[in-house]
Every structure is written in structure tokens, then in C-alpha cells.
Image: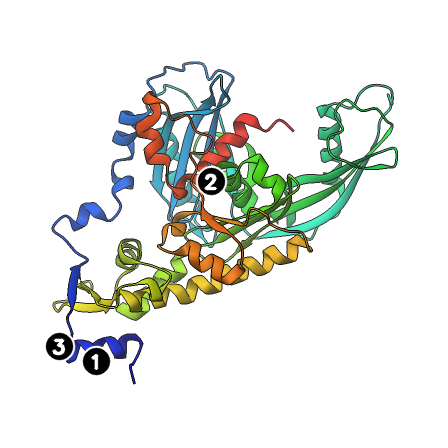
Amino acid sequence: MKKKGLLGIFERLSSGQFPQFKSLWTEDQETSLEPGLQTTSAAAARTTVPVILKDNPDGIAVGLDVGSSKIVAVIGRLDSDRQIEVLGIGEAVSEGLTRGSISNLTKTTTAIKEALQAASSTTNLKINQVIANYSGMCNNLDQRGVIIREDMIRDIRSEDIIRLKNEMDGNPYPAGEQIVYLEPQHFIIDDEPDIRDPIGMSGQRFESDFHVITGEVNGLNNLHKCVSQAGTGIKAIYPTAIASAEAVVCEDEKEEGIAVIDIGAAVTSIVVYKNGIMRYADTILLGGNSINADIKQFTGLSNKQAELLKKTYGSVLPADTDPNEIIQYKILNGTKDRFISKVDLAMIIQSRMEELIGLAYDKIEEALKGRCLTCGIVFTGGDSRLQNIRKLGEQITGLKCHAGTPTLHLKTNAPQQELAKKLNDPIYATSIGLLKMGLTKLV
């Protein structure tokens, strides 16, 4: 009987079965661990558009992704074709968050400041405010808002919708929570229901059923503190999943029905759209770090080594992995070579990823309430880059799955090609989505 796991690996190795070796560590090992993070300022200087912006003019926005593994700041504006022109980008290692929530104010503030300085270094633009994300625990509520318009003859304007949203602040919410985001599911004017777009219509009693996302007050306050101490302010905060979705899906997909699963380092964020409306957004306290921890326990590697092993050789489907490939590695301070087959590595990753996707899909099904997701599921975030994740997602959910990259709305002409190539990576979905919302979201 063929044994699995480490016991099976060592049994095969001891019997002389070494079909093919691959070395994880090379002579340039030190520069390969985190190449993007060690050359942030230089990369930004090479790739950003040489525009001098002295007075922080209108039309400029900054997206700030405060993540558990890295913090990314992106500065941009809209061109005449409504495409996003990225002017600057900065990154910094994030060590002050635990499970999506800020646990060390000093470390988080320092990393935010570093990312913002790198992003603005080539633009001469002083960043006064940012659009930031919230990755903490969420709560989903359905509530109704009502206002009485004094001038029932005057057409309904965006100001009326803003007033209606502001009325929601006075509603009761669970202790220690406040609104992070809310979206109208439909509008009601003088008892006329199911209105999608009320702008230009007339009426006195103006109502809406809202889907409300609340977050922890302490977590939101800590985010404000860190950004403020970094020398800027927050214009708006959006849940991570909603920001990522803005970068990787289009309006037609939202209309037909689509879900986005953003697999981050410490948490996984989920959002569901149907009929053009956000129906649900939530957070699962499970992410790529959980996979790293499993690999670490199995192999004895450090956290960084486990992350590199996963990124370099990882797959989520053992059945589609070459059973003859063996990976050679050394643990920190180790003197002897160790070995793991790509199949066994894939089995470790598959087990945790099946749990993660299963939990996410349970929430998606609950949110749909019988509605159909015509466009299926989009995977984004750092660990969506794992091989065969689309196949595994389809096996678990029975829905069409594909990878989402954040260049959908970016300008990609000649001056922007190098930068667009860098940003064509799901790890930038949240920051690009935040930038897009800062540039386009009016109400």
C-alpha cells in the first residue's frame, strides 16, 4: 500500500527513488524572496508618468490598500476615455496587522508612510487624503431608510440619495459596530416600489431598502489613527472585497450575477452582485498564511521559505501534478538536504484551499437566496495565482470560475505599458479598485 505524506516521501527516498530533482534555493536566493518590495522607490521612478502636480488638482485620487502582508498606495486620474492613468505606486511590507485588523499602530503607521512617500516621490504631489480599505470582520444587515422631501415637485437629485444614506446613521446597530458601506437594493417613491434609478423623478416620500455592511468601531478608528499619523487623512473607506471587485469585474457581470473571492494573506474577502447591485460582502479569517503554516509544519521551513515554496512550486490539484518531481530544500541552520514531492506539496495546499473555497461558497449561496450567478466566480488576491485554482473552484462550486486581474480599467497605451504590466497581478486588485472608486463613485 502506497503511503502518503512525509512518511511516504521518506519511504520513497530511502528506497532510492529520485526521478527528478529541483532546487528551491539558488545562488541569487536572497534577491528572489521579495523582489518587488526591495526596489519600490526605484521601480516607481522608472515606471510612473513624468507629471508634475504641485497643487493637488481635482481629478487626482489615491487608493491605499492596508493589507496583512503589504501596504500599497496608488495615485491616479481618469483620462478623456474614462480609463485610469496611474501616476505613482508605492509599496511597503506590512507587519502591524493580525487577521485583517491593525494590531500594532506604530508598525502600520510606518509602513503606510513609506508606501505613500514612494507613490508620491515622482509626482511632487502632497497626498492630503486617501481612499482606504477595511479588511476586518463584517456584519450584513438589511434596513430601510425614509426621508420626506419638502419640495415634492422638484426632481430627485443625487443630494436626495446622499441625504437618504445619511439617515441610515441613526439606525440601531450591534454594539461596537458602525456602517462601513451601504448600497440601495431598490428605491420607493410615494409607495411606488422597485425603482432602480430615481434621479429625475418626483415625489414626497422617498425610501430605499439598503444592504448595510458594518465593521468594528475600534478597527475603523485604528485605521484612521494610522493614516492620520502618517500625515494624511481618509476621504472614504470601503470593504476590501468591494474594492477588489471594482478592479476585476465590469458592470455587465454585476448585472448578470457574479461573486468575487479575494484571497489575501490573512483573510479572504467575498462580495456578491446580482442585477447590478451588491447583495452581500463578508470576511473569512482564513488566507494564504494558513497554507504557509501548514507547509511550515509539514516541512520545517520558516514562514518566508514556506511562502516561497508555495509560490514557486505550489498547485491546488495533486492529480494534475507530475508525481515524479521532487523538490530539494534546506531548513534554516540545517546542514542536510530535505525533499518533498510536488504531489505532496499540492496535497497540503489543496486541503486548506478546499476548506477556504467551501466556506466562501457557503456564504455566497446564503446571500444569493435562489438567484443565479450567470458569470460565476472570480478569484483575485495574492493566492489566486496558485496553479489550477480555477479548476478546484469549479469542482467545489459547480460554477464557472476564472482569475481576475486589475488591468480591466487601466490605461495601457505606450507610456503606461511597463506600469500596466507590473500591475497586471491580482495582488494589486484592492489598491486599483480603491483608486477607481475614488475617481468615479459620486454617491
Residue 283 in the image: state x and y as whole percent.
54, 53
* Residue to which mark 2 is pinned: 430
How many marks are shown on the rendered structure?
A: 3
| Residue in front for this viewpoint, 122 or 81 | 81
Q: Secondary structure at mark 1?
A: helix
- Identify which residue is drawn at 51% across, 30% down: 436
Residue 92, quarter of the rendered image: top left
Badge 2 crowding class, 10 Å Cα cut-off, few under 14, some 14 to 19, many 20 or more, is many
Question: Distance between the Cα atoms at labels 3 and 2?
Answer: 47 Å
Instruction: Classify 197 as above or below 105.
Output: above
For marks 2 and 1 on the same chain, the one whose residue lies earlier in the sequence: 1
Residue 183, quarter of the rendered image: top right
Question: Distance between the Cα atoms at labels 2 and 1?
Answer: 45 Å
Residue 442, quarter of the rendered image: top right
Q: Tell me the amino acid under the disc marked 1.
A: Glu
Residue 286 visible (yes or no): no
* Residue to which mark 1 is pinned: 11
Residue 4 in the image: state x and y as whole percent.
31, 77
Badge 3 crowding class, 10 Å Cα cut-off, few under 14, some 14 to 19, many 20 or more, is few
Q: Quadrant of the N terminus?
A: bottom left
Badge 1 crowding class, 10 Å Cα cut-off, few under 14, some 14 to 19, many 20 or more, is some
Q: Quadrant of the C terminus?
A: top right
| Foreground disc of the pair 2, 1 | 1
Instruction: Classify 414 as above or below 408.
Output: above
- Identify which residue is drawn at 29% across, 81% down: 3
For marks 3 and 2 on the same chain, the one whose residue lies earlier in the sequence: 3
- In the image, is 122 to the left or to the right of 144? left
| Residue in front for this viewpoint, 224 or 301 | 301
Q: Tell me the amino acid under the disc marked 2.
A: Thr
* Residue to which mark 3 is pinned: 16
Residue 39 in the image: state x and y as whole percent.
25, 36
